[in-house]
Amino acid sequence: MSENKNARPHQPLGLAKRGYSGVIQSLSAGGAASTLNDVELESRLMELGFVEGARVEVLHEGIVGRDPIAVRVENVTIAVRRREAMAIIVA
Amino acid sequence: MEAPLMHLALVGTPNSGKTSLFNALTGSRQKVANYPGVTVERKEGAFVTPNGRQISLLDLPGTYSLRGRSPDEEITRDVVLGRASGEPLPDLVLCVADSTNLRLTIRLLLELKSTGRPLALVLNMFDIATRRGVSVDVARLSEALGVPVVTSIAVRKGGTADLVRLTDEILAREELSERKNLWRPLTVAELRATQREADRIIAATVSLPARPDTWTARIDAVVLHPVAGLLILLAILFVMFQAVFAWAQPLMQLLSSAFDSLRDFVHETLPAGLLQSFLQNGVISGVGSVIVFLPQIIIIFLFILLLEDFGYMARAAFLMDRIMGGAGLHGRAFIPLLSSFACAIPGIMATRVIDNRRDRLTTILIAPLMTCSARIPVYTLIISAFIPPKLIWGWINLQGLVMFGLYAAGIVSALGVSFLIKFFIWRDYQPAPFMLELPDYKMPRLRSIAIGVSNRAKMFLQRAGTTIFSMMVMIWFLASFPQPPAGAEGPAINYSLAAMIGKAFEPLLAPVGFNWQIAVALIPGMAAREVAVAALGTVYAIEGGKEAAEQIGQMLATKWSLATALSLLAWYIFAPQCASTLAVIRRETGSSKWMVATFAYMLALAYLASLATYSIAASLGLG
């Protein structure tokens, strides 16, 4: 897909700035230094609607260290810490 | 022939409007209790369908899946699967969805289907969805999901008529739809597959507006702003405490004068003696001085429930997450801690939303430091007796300011204790994830709020009627017996059991400026903090004889130095006296260890704070 001229670089949602919008490409709990194990983290993210193909937008950032972030996932807003959002690969 | 009682259960994601639907269906016909063995709130209600069927409705804790990763979610799973002891398998499960936000609920519903229970989907808040331009093809959605679908508007009169009618229809053919339970915990791949399936169904049957709720976006732009948001949060808390102090005053005075006239009536109609003394000093002074605080309890719960229904609580958790994280707390701890301002017991019970055990324990340990409403009587009494009600800068009431200071001291010390726990006990500790839905803002509904507030008020009055009443009888007994010998001089109470107990503790409490009357009041205060006020009332009313009709506050102002009053205020920031809180801690943590730890550290802090306050105040010449 790197040949696609519309392709955007893949990045973890945990590094996205306020105003970023994109589409979830994959979940990879291994990339997040979460206290949850990989299966648990991926399960929880999915239960909150973070699945491949979902549109996401970073709406708000917290006060300290721009953390946590409020993410619009399709038509739901979810607050999540950047540490866990590292598991969500977007583009 | 009467139809048998049918059991229905409401299941849904958090924020799906499940509770307002429950309130709309059952109204005031509700019973709130706990599930056996766990402290998960069990809400059951009743209603009758148009066909005359008796329905028992269970409002199950909100959940995104049936995995059951917290005690609340386990209850929901176990009831739906028929594994919960003492709970009948529901005849029909109503899966409640916020119509503006179907994704997560439809996925949950697909998972629920595998349990084989008869199932229906309730599209709640359908009016809001329509207004926002969401249109749902209900018939096609029902066909795609393979379950009946009905719309409802819980907050409107008659808005649940279709739902009730459908319930009748489904129950009439209930035996046809029941299937075998094939549910098992979903793997990540299965979760992904059900969410994709849900998204596919939604794409085919629901058309969404291009723009999300603009009001929520506009409000959030301010409320979640890093600077403005925090200022708004502080302002809300400040208004809340000014309101608790100022708005409640007229009502409290009304209640207080009613009890005064009742006491005068008893004084004049009954002959002097034990019965008169018991009714006048034990029952009316004692219980009356606690019931007077009902308006304040109502106001604080009104604020908490309004903020929760409006959708602000989740925002507050978002704003506070990292700030609390610095003190070793989870963002989700904010809601339990805020509830602890009303009472530590629901607060400690609300820590169940925190699924990491360490985060939960830390929150439980510091929850009793939040200024609960039971401290308000003590604070109010002392503040109104010793702090002049003058205005600073023309608009800040000095009494309100002192109150605010006491609350702030509680919060700061809670954060400090949490930091110490993190630093000394759980050094290797890593923060647990914070993941929370920020629901769209909704206009709180008065009826729902009214039901919530009245449930809380009932609980408070029940406590006043039982625990506090029996304590007051005990205090009156201790303060009245043994009676002074004939020809004895001085007030009768000086010869009583209460005086003996109080005087025994006096040497220990003298360094913090407490006299034996305070020591007497602190002991029954173990039952509930506000009992201390009632106890002081009883102790001084009996000692004062004729002055019994006087306000306790005026009495205290003449009996105590300012240093003693300030010292008692400092004591009550930390005061560990609340037997029910300690009992809940033991139950929630599953061991007496944490209960003893809480009691010990709070007692130590209370003593040190009072010692410091008294010494400083005395050295300033206020002793």
Image (cartoon, rainbow, N blue to C red):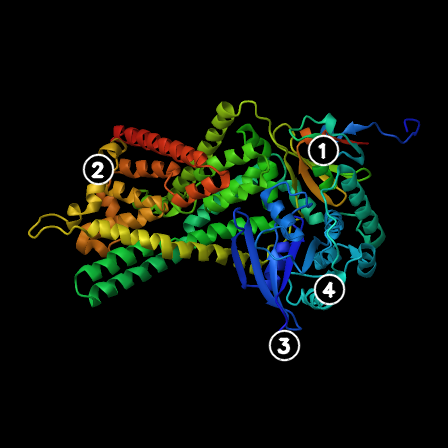
Q: Quadrant of residue B278?
A: bottom left
Residue at point 56%, 48% (across, down): B307
Q: Which mark is residue B504?
A: 2
Q: State whether residue B199 appears in this view.
A: yes
Q: Is residue B120 left or right of residue B316?
A: right
| Gap between marks 4 and 1 measured at Cα | 38 Å
Mark 2 or mark 4, earlier in chain: 4
| Gap between marks 2 and 1 measured at Cα | 60 Å
Residue at point 63%, 37% (across, down): B225
- Which amino acid does the dot numbered 3 rest on? Met
Please provide percent x and percent y for residue B86: 57, 55
| Gap between marks 3 and 4 measured at Cα | 19 Å
Q: Quadrant of residue B621?
A: top left
Examine the rendered structure and indicate whether residue B578 appears above or below residue B615. Answer: below
Name the residue carrying label 4. B175
- Which amino acid does the dot numbered 4 rest on? Glu
Q: Are marks 2 and 3 on the same chain?
A: yes
Q: Disc 4 on helix, strand or loop?
A: helix
